[in-house]
Image (spheres, rainbow, N blue to C red):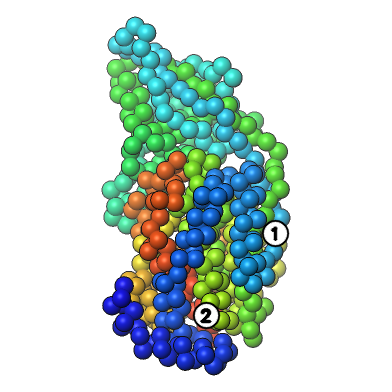
Amino acid sequence: MKSVFQKSLSLTVLASSLLSLGASAAPANDPATLGQIRDSAMNSDWAYERLADLTDLVGPRLSGSVGAQAAVEQVAAAMRKLGAKVTLQPVKVPHWVRGEEKAEVVEYAGRPNGVTQKVVLTALGGSGATPAAGLTAPVIVVHSFEELKAKGAQVKGSIVLFDVAFDQEMADRGQAGPAYGAGSRIRTQGPRLAAEMGAAAALVRSVGGANYRIAHTGATGLVDGARIPAAAVTAEDAMLMSRLSARGPLKLHLTLTPQTLPDADSFNVIADWPGTDKADEVVIVSGHLDSWDLATGAHDDGTGVAGAMGVIETLKKLDLHPRRTIRVIAWMNEENGTRGGKAYFEANKDKLDKHFAAIESDEGGGRPFGFIASVTPQMVKYFAPLKTALDPIGAGVFQRHDQAAGADIGPLERAGVPSFQPLVDASFYFSYHHTPADTLDKVSPLELKRHVAVMTSLSWFLANMDENIGRVAKTD
C-alpha cells in the first residue's frame, strides 16, 4: 500500500494544512479531504479491534439472548467513548432458543444389521420441536416446490427433505446474492409448505458453499400453529439421503427440541455524529448487531457493525464534522424478524424527508470494490469525485441499481429514501454464513480497513453533498 499512499501524498499534505486551520475551514467534498479520510481509515486497526471485542468477548448474539444484550451495551459504550450522541431504541424481538438436535437414518434398502447412518444437521430458526424422545418417519426427497406438490399423497406424516444445491459457481462469478436468494427461498418457504401439506418435519439442504459437512442455519417461514420440526442438513448428508432414497424407502429418527419463548426486550443502538448547518438531515450508516447462535457472527454481520462504527472513529480522529448528521445504527434482529429496521421505520415514518440517504453493510467482510446505490440515473455523475477518491485502494466502482436491497433499511428504501451498500466480493461469504465457522479468523484486517474507508468516504460525501439527491421510486 505504500505506493498508493505516496501517490496521494500531495492530497494528504493539503488536507493536513486545511485541517490545521480547524474542521470548519476544510472544504467538505474536496479531493484533499476525501483522500485524508481514505488514508486515515487505511491506517487504522480500530474497527478490527472492535470486531474482536464483539466476537471474542461477547460471541453469539441471537435476538433475546444474553449475548445480544451484552453486544448492545458494548457497542453503545464504544460509541459514547468517541463522543457520539447515543440512543437505545427499544425493540421487541423474537426469542427462539436451540435445544437438542440429532438425527440418524435407521432404515434403508441394503442396511447391514445393526447399522445406522448419522445425519449432521442444525435446527432452523422458528423450528417446532419433536417429542423429547424424537420421532421416526419416512423420508420423502424433493428437489423443487413442484415436485413437493406432485408427491402430495406421500407427504402427510413424512419427513420432507428439500435437496437443492447451492450454486457456488454463480457465487464464484460475482452472483453470490442471487445464488443465496434461490436457496433461501427453499429454506424459508419449503418447511411452511410441507407443514401445510401435513408433513411431520422438514429438512433443507444447507444454503451455502464449502461442503465440509457443516450445517448452515437460517430463518424459516413457519408460523404459530404449524411449527413442525425443521432443520438444515449438510450437503453431504442431503446427498446421502438422496442416494439412499434412490435404492428404496428410508426412515429417519429425528430429535429437535427448540423453544419459542415470549418476545424479549432489546434495542437498536443509534449513535449520532451531529451535523453543522444541516444537522436536522440524516445519513444512516449501519449493520446488524444480532447473529445466529452457532458462531460469533464475524462476517454476518460483525464486519458491517464494526465498519459503521469506524466511520465515527475516523471522522473524530480527523476532527471532521459533516453538514448533515451521520447516524450509525447497529440494528437488532435482522436474522429472524428484522424487527429493528421495522421499529426504526415506524418511529421515523413522518420524518423521512429528513433522511437524506441510508447505507447498510450486510454482505460480509470480503474485498470491497466500491458501492451500490439506488439513486436516479441523473444523479450518477455527481459521485465522480467519490469514485476518484476511492480508486487508489481499488474501491472506485459505482453500480446504480433500482434497489440496493438492504434488509434493515428496506422499509426506508421502499418509502423512497436513497439507499447504498458496499460492493464486496461475496464469493466465499456463504461458505461461513450462518455456520459454526463464522469466526474472527476468517476476516481479513486489510479488507476491513478498505471497508471502513468505503463506508466513511461514502457517509461523508453524502452528508456534505450540495446537490439534492432526490427520492427513489417508492415500491410496495
Q: Nearer the viewer, residue 254 or 155?
A: 254
If you read the primary sequence from the N terminus, does the residue marked by circle 2 or circle 1 appear first?
1
Kindly identify the residue that appears in the image at 63 percent across and 32 percent down: 259
Q: Nearer the viewer, residue 386 or 67?
A: 67
Residue 135: percent from left, percent from top: 52, 17
Q: As drawn, is 143 to the left or to the right of 277? A: left
Residue 80: percent from left, percent from top: 65, 67
| Residue 89's disc number | 1
Task: State which mark lies toward you, 2 or 1.
Answer: 2
Q: Which residue is mark 2?
A: 318
Q: Amino acid at mark 1?
A: Gln
Residue 399: percent from left, percent from top: 39, 69
Kindly identify the residue that appears in the image at 68 percent across and 36 percent down: 261
The kind of secondary structure element at disc 2 is loop
Q: Amino acid at mark 2?
A: Leu
The quarter of the picture where residue 222 lies is top right
How packed mark 2 is, by other alpha carbons closer than 10 Å (few <14, some 14-19, many 20 or more), is some
The kind of secondary structure element at disc 1 is strand
Kindly identify the residue that appears in the image at 42 percent across and 43 percent down: 437
Residue 134: percent from left, percent from top: 54, 18
The quarter of the picture where residue 30 lies is bottom left
27 vs 286: above or below: below
Distance (Cα) linking label 2 and label 1: 29 Å
473 vs 226: above or below: below
Q: As drawn, is 27 to the left or to the right of 271? A: left
The C terminus lies in quadrant: bottom right
194 vs 207: above or below: above
Kindly identify the residue that appears in the image at 39 percent across and 87 percent down: 11
| Residue 462's disc number | none
Q: In the image as oriented, which residue stretches furthest toward the top?
A: 113
